[in-house]
Image (tube, helix red, strand yellow):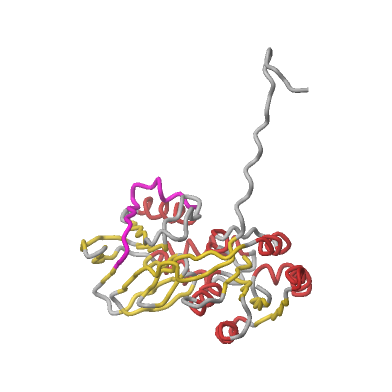
Amino acid sequence: MRRILVLLNARAGTVVDCGPETVTAALAALGEGGRQIDVHMVAPKAMPAAIAEGARASHDALVVGGGDGSVNLAARALAGTSKVLGVLPFGTMNLFARDLRMPAGIDAAVAALKTAAPAEVDLATLDGRAFHSLSGIGFFSQMARAREETRGHPFGRLLGVAWAAVKALRRTGRFRFAVALDGRREVVDAYAVLVTNNRFGPDWRRQRLDEGLLEVHIAEDASTLGLARAGADLLTGGWRDNPGIRSITAREVTIAHVRRRAWTATDGELVRAPMPLHYGVAPRALTVLMAPPEDPPTPAVRATAGADVPA
């Protein structure tokens, strides 16, 4: 890759915290080795157009600095093309960036990008629109909706997320969904359904990005205590040990409801989508820059009594 276009969301958390000049200066290191780097600071509302134009440009790679929503736009734009996507984790959750082994902090992230190599990964689809990590209804969509309402919380992002969770829990009710998994249909009473692209571990990380699978998480315990516990477990990644949350793998998923539309939160993007919802998998549809795994620590070698130790 000789020409790299970098698009930075001007309101992304890292850009705001560090300052645009500091971030831009750190990115100059990507130009080592004769690479040409074009860096643009983009207003949030202008990101869709900038990413669409970047996908058509002559650059070999497009690097996006922002949250999961900005990365979602880029993944959709580059899906099925030969252009490579790089991610700088400048948002709140940064789920996809973490799976690409991109560390937090501008200097560490730039260093990781310099050693990253292209890799083909899956995308999931919702009604034909690609997404990189997850899509949910019920509590998950209400959480995203409340998060938008509490953005810019005066006490900081962490308290803003906590207050959004409280609002989401108060708004969430139990619904009856018809869920078809690879054609197997069942009716469930749940207050949340989450569909993920490949399988997440309890720490909200994926071991593989090319399994060609969806995983569906159905939160069924609607008691007040169960709702609060599941909400906390889903936010902290402890849902695997929660008996009120059932997880099933499939390659095609359809979720139907008597309502004509439902709030869906997909990679941080909140949309009131028409029902039913149709999910699928696009295997190896996107080429990304993935940092190499960290080297495991070298085990210490201890000489035991009587052993022959070379001079």
Q: Look at the picture and state if 228 lies above or below 264.
A: above
Q: Look at the picture and state if 205 lies above or below 7.
A: above
The answer to which image quadrant residue 103 occupies is bottom right
Q: Please provide percent x and percent y for residue 29.
A: 76, 68
Q: Does the magenta stretch include residue 251?
A: yes
91 to the left or right of 259: right
Q: Which quadrant holds the N terminus?
A: bottom right
The answer to which image quadrant residue 260 occupies is bottom left
In this view, the residue in front, 101 or 148, is: 101
Q: Please report the residue visible at 61 percent of the width from the left and 73 percent of the height from the top.
A: 64
Q: Please report the residue visible at 64 percent of the width from the left and 82 percent of the height from the top.
A: 43
Q: Please provide percent x and percent y for residue 48.
A: 55, 83
In this view, the residue in front, 206 or 185, is: 206
Q: Residue furthest top?
A: 306
Q: Please report the residue visible at 21 percent of the width from the left and 62 percent of the height from the top.
A: 184
In this view, the residue in front, 204 or 228, is: 204
The answer to which image quadrant residue 87 occupies is bottom right
305 to the left or right of 28: left
In this view, the residue in front, 180 or 198, is: 198
Q: Which quadrant holds the C terminus?
A: top right
Q: Look at the picture and state if 285 lies above or below 305.
A: below
Q: Please provide percent x and percent y for residue 174.
A: 30, 63
70 to the left or right of 124: right
Q: Please report the residue visible at 38 percent of the width from the left and 55 percent of the height from the top.
A: 227
What's drawn in magenta, residue-wise? 236-253
